[in-house]
Structure formats: structure tokens, C-alpha cells
Image: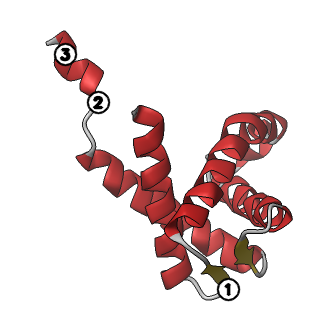
């Protein structure tokens, strides 16, 4: 259930990025957008930790602001992988990816505030 909710939140955040950021486009059904969200989640689970580790000195020097660049790279990788799977999700460049990553992060954060963790309620 938690995976499904996380995928739904990510899909909504990606949809918001397609509406708010020039250069990020998506044409298809919500199910295809959920597929993009799954690709994005898998990349964030496996590739992002490696990139974070490799860029650790830059994260320290920039006081953590380099994480925005890593988020943009994740969005560009998602665009490339989604197109290989035949999903029409496209990010046109680094600038669009950078702003799109900020939108995705903000929307995901705001939506996550409203989603309760059922385990914490059961333990109480």
C-alpha cells in the first residue's frame, strides 16, 4: 500500500512538472504517467545513492545545494529511460530538468505531509 501511495504522489508531482515547467512534456494516460513514476522511483532508489556518494565533496562545498543538480540528472535519466519503454515523457534539457526537479520535490513534499503512515497509527 505504501508503494502504491508513493507512486501516486510521484505521478502527481511529475504531472505538475509537465504543467508548470516549459520543456517537460508528457502525452498519454495516467497509467503511463504512473509508469514514469515507477521508473523515477527505481532510479532514485538505485542510481541516486551512487551519484550522491560520488559527488559528496561537491555536496559539502556547496552546502548541499548540489543535490538540486543530482535531482535534475535523475529527471533527465527518467526521461531517457521512459522513452526507451515507449512512454512519451520528455525533458528538453538541463534547465527544464533543474526546474522540474524543484517542482517535483516541492509537490512530493507537500503531498507527503497529507499522507499518514499507517504503521505509526497502529503502534499507538
The N terminus lies in quadrant: top left
Is residue 85 rendered to the left or right of residue 106?
right
Disc 3: which residue? 122
Residue contact between numbered discs 1 and 3, judged by CB atoms under 8 Å: no
Residue projecting furthest to the top: 123
Judged by depth in the image, the label closer to the viewer, 1 or 3, is 3
Residue 33 in picture, x, y percent from top left: 57, 65
Residue 21 in picture, x, y percent from top left: 56, 83
Residue 56 quadrant: top right
For label 2, the SS is: loop
Is residue 123 rendered to the left or right of residue 61?
left
Residue contact between numbered discs 2 and 3, judged by CB atoms under 8 Å: no
* Label disc, if present, on residue 117 of the rendered structure: 2
For label 1, the SS is: loop
In the depicted view, which residue is nearer to us: 114 or 66?
A: 114
Residue 95 quadrant: bottom right
For label 3, the SS is: helix
Q: Residue at 69%, 71% (x, y): give it.
A: 97
Q: Residue at 72%, 45% (x, y): give it.
A: 43
How many neighbours does mark 2 have within 10 angstroms: few (below 14), some (14-19), or many (20 or more)?
few
The C terminus lies in quadrant: top left
Residue 106 in picture, x, y percent from top left: 43, 61
Amino acid at each position: 500500500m505504501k508503494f502504491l501511495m508513493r507512486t501516486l504522489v510521484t505521478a502527481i508531482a511529475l504531472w505538475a512538472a509537465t504543467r508548470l515547467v516549459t520543456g517537460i512534456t508528457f502525452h498519454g494516460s495516467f497509467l503511463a504517467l504512473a509508469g514514469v513514476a515507477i521508473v523515477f522511483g527505481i532510479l532514485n532508489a538505485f542510481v541516486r545513492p551512487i551519484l550522491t556518494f560520488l559527488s559528496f565533496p561537491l555536496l559539502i562545498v556547496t552546502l548541499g545545494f548540489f543535490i538540486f543538480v543530482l535531482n535534475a540528472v535523475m529527471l533527465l535519466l527518467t526521461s531517457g529511460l521512459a522513452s526507451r519503454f515507449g512512454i512519451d515523457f520528455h525533458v528538453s534539457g538541463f534547465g527544464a530538468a533543474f526546474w522540474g526537479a524543484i517542482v517535483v520535490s516541492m509537490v512530493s513534499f507537500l503531498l507527503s505531509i497529507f499522507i499518514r503512515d499507517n504503521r505509526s497509527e497502529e503502534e499507538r
